[in-house]
Image (cartoon, rainbow, N blue to C red):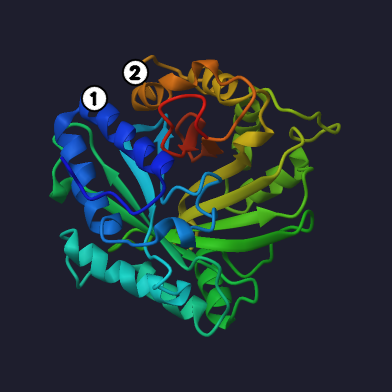
Amino acid sequence: MNAPILAIDSAQRHALKRALHIIEGLDPAAAREFARVTGVVLGDETELAARTSRLLNQTGSPLEFSFSTSSDDLRYTMEVGGSETPPACRLDRIKGLLAMLGVDPDWDGVAREFPVLQNERRLAWGAWLGARQPFQNAHAAANRYKIYAEVPYDSNAETSSLLQRYLGVQPLRAGPCAQLVVVGAAPGSQRCEFYFEIGSRTVTRSYLSALLDRVGLARRLDDLASLIGSFEFRHGRASDALPNAQYGFSYSVLPGGGEPIFSVFIFAADLAGGDAWVRHQILASRRRQSELRSYAAMTESFSERHVCCSSHNMVTFSVDENAPAGLQVSLSPPPPSIDQN
């Protein structure tokens, strides 16, 4: 289990080793598979700390965990290139990494179209690779991967065509400026997720309802708003609006808008309190004690971090056509003590 995890600074390296130890306590087979995957993707990087741009997370870690109430799978997203790999080359690098991880190199799906969205445009980070592996019966064949591709602000005709194929030709409703910034898809899948930033800290219920209605989910407004409103935020809210925060949203759909999942994102720093209180709110939102057990284990050291919110990154609230509103939280590998950030 001694994967060559990384030429990065000491604090990040210790945090990743601690995370591996926690995973091993939950499921040794899952820990071995985690070590294998991170060894392939991150283990041969050099000068990683120097090139990390803190765009994956605020700590500068090359890996970010994600925990969901809908599944106890181990999920994480990784950087895919050091300073020697320009952002424009990282989608191509992912193809090679997937082959090394055991994915059929002839995979198809919408992610094959992502390179044309970036052609000859300025990029900040290019692409990331997400991994999802089960805690039970962990082995290479059970893993699933997701490719995240940066969408340049000066998007091209191919981007517009992809959006129209999945979400229709009508523009998003007038309101806070929404900018498409990322697309994501699993190799071999036609499902695509479109991630937007919102250029305002005020999101009204009517605007949220219109976003939901775009994919036929307006009836889920109360469920979604109620889950968001169950958390304590640092700032207040305007009348008929969500709490004041920096928001984003995504549509995960099949072509033509089929089987939609709509998500709202917030930065965890907009929630009240430090990592300890954010952790408390996350765990209090569980419908069952069995939910988020790996998150609970990974964040146990946060119990005394009352001021700083440096390890939690994003909190996501999601609805689909039928399931209860769900929650997902992303997390940098936590340091062994509250003195390390």
- Total numbered circles: 2
Measured as percent of width and height from the top left, residue 219 is found at 61, 37
Q: Look at the picture and state if 214 lies above or below 283.
A: below
Helix, strand or loop at disc 1?
helix
Residue at 64% x, 23% y: name it.
Answer: 307
Amino acid at pointer 1: Leu
Q: Residue at label 1?
A: 26
Q: Residue furthest bottom?
A: 120
Measured as percent of width and height from the top left, residue 108 is found at 27, 70
Q: Is 108 left or right of 152, judged from the image as shown?
A: left
Amino acid at pointer 2: Ser
Q: Is residue 65 visible?
A: no
Measured as percent of width and height from the top left, residue 209 is found at 69, 43
Q: Earlier in the sequence, mark 2 or mark 1?
A: 1
Measured as percent of width and height from the top left, residue 50 is found at 47, 60
Q: Residue at label 2?
A: 290
In the image shown, does 4 or 293 lie closer to the viewer?
A: 4
Q: Is 306 left or right of 259, judged from the image as shown?
A: right
Q: Look at the picture and state if 303 lies above or below 167.
A: above
Q: Quadrant of the N terminus?
A: top left
